[in-house]
Image: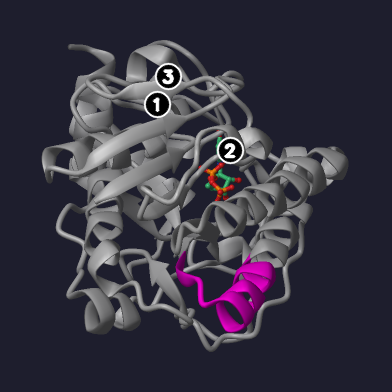
Amino acid sequence: MKILVAGGAGYIGSVVTRRLQEAGHDVTVLDNLSTGFADNVDGCELVELPISRAGEVLDSSFDVVVHLAASALVAESVAHPERYWQNNVVEGLALLEAMRLAGVGGFVFSSTCATYGEPETLPITEATPTAPVNSYGASKLALDHAIASYSRAHGLAAISFRYFNVAGAYGDLRERHDPETHLIPNLLRGATGGTFKIFGTDFPTRDGSAVRDYVHVLDLADAHEMALEALEPGTHHIVNLGSGDGTTVKEVLAAVEKVTGRSVPAEEHDRRPGDPPELVADYARARELLGWSPKRGLEEQIADAWAALHP
Ligand code: UDP
């Protein structure tokens, strides 16, 4: 298939791009390099433009757009909601409209478990009510709603993936955020002489730290490849991508110490604004629709991220 990967120079986007290339697809990357890196893209064209200018690239020869070009930090979205409404909603709507005008019928969208807010029941299925507690989740949910209506009215074939916590690396493709806010990269920095901060030790969880569901970036990329076969005109599938296992921050810390063989000095801090206590996926729909299941556990995620930092 001929595929435009919006955000293909970023962490997850670059792994998705590489997997699609390996599967023999004809891939073009669209990325404004605001948080992505040109050297993450190898062996395909990189168009350096914002997604709002996707119309300059798209034509009816494209089969699918995979859209991972967004702002994705909970705390930033609490402090700067305007960035999330602009980058994720306004720009995302422009991309959808460029696709409609160009006659591109397939869409795979990176949504998030942050759309569910602080769910009353766990694990989270796609039927769990959406009630985001931060602008990141709200902005992603807004685009999910727009996609659903494009699908109904214009026949768009779409899948929204609700990512849980993505971790690990694929070869040299790893998290390179600045500033780095994500748990596993920060723990790995703690293992090499930095100090690690635990945000929140008073959550109603088994050890007081927050529970998340960590999924390997390569498993996630595989789901995108599988999604291409599951796209149906006029249908918008919402699909959770997580491991089904919940791990506390303190448990991830212990796993990092085990995998690296180093100790991680930790300081206890207040909760980060907007952080829910516990998010764990039920991924039954991904299994049923795509035949997908996660293959690489937490220790493999940590080991791959560690190896990518120390090649
Ligand atoms: N976290 C932490 N210290 C850090 C980074 C993250 O304690 O240096 C916690 C964070 O508060 C959350 C969990 O680890 O409970 C996962 O955070 P991350 O930013 O990786 O992903 P999020 O769930 O916010 O998308």
Amino acid at pointer 3: Arg
- Majority secondary structure of the magenta segment? helix
- Mark 1, Cα crowd under 10 Å, few <14 / some 14-19 / many 20+, is many
Distance of mark 1 from mark 2, alpha carbons?
44 Å
Q: What residue is disc 1 on?
A: 264
Q: What residue is disc 3 on?
A: 189
Give the extent of the magenta segment. Answer: 144-160
- Mark 2, Cα crowd under 10 Å, few <14 / some 14-19 / many 20+, is many
Report the image quarter containing ligand 1.
Answer: top right
- Mark 3, Cα crowd under 10 Å, few <14 / some 14-19 / many 20+, is some
Does the magenta-highlighted stretch encompass residue 157?
Answer: yes
Q: Where does the image place residue 6, in percent across and percent down from the top left?
A: 49, 39
For the residue labelled by badge 1, is the local secondary structure a helix, a strand or a loop?
loop
In which quarter of the view is residue 287 placed?
bottom left
Residue in front for this viewpoint, 60 or 241? 60
Amino acid at pointer 2: Ala
> Is 111 left or right of 139, judged from the image as shown?
left
For the residue labelled by badge 3, is the local secondary structure a helix, a strand or a loop?
helix
Distance of mark 2 from mark 3, alpha carbons?
37 Å
Q: Where does the image place residue 259, in percent across and percent down from the top left?
A: 20, 34
Instruction: Name the residue at 20% across, 68% down.
Output: 293
Q: Nearer the viewer, mark 1 or mark 2?
A: 2
Distance of mark 3 from mark 1, alpha carbons?
9 Å
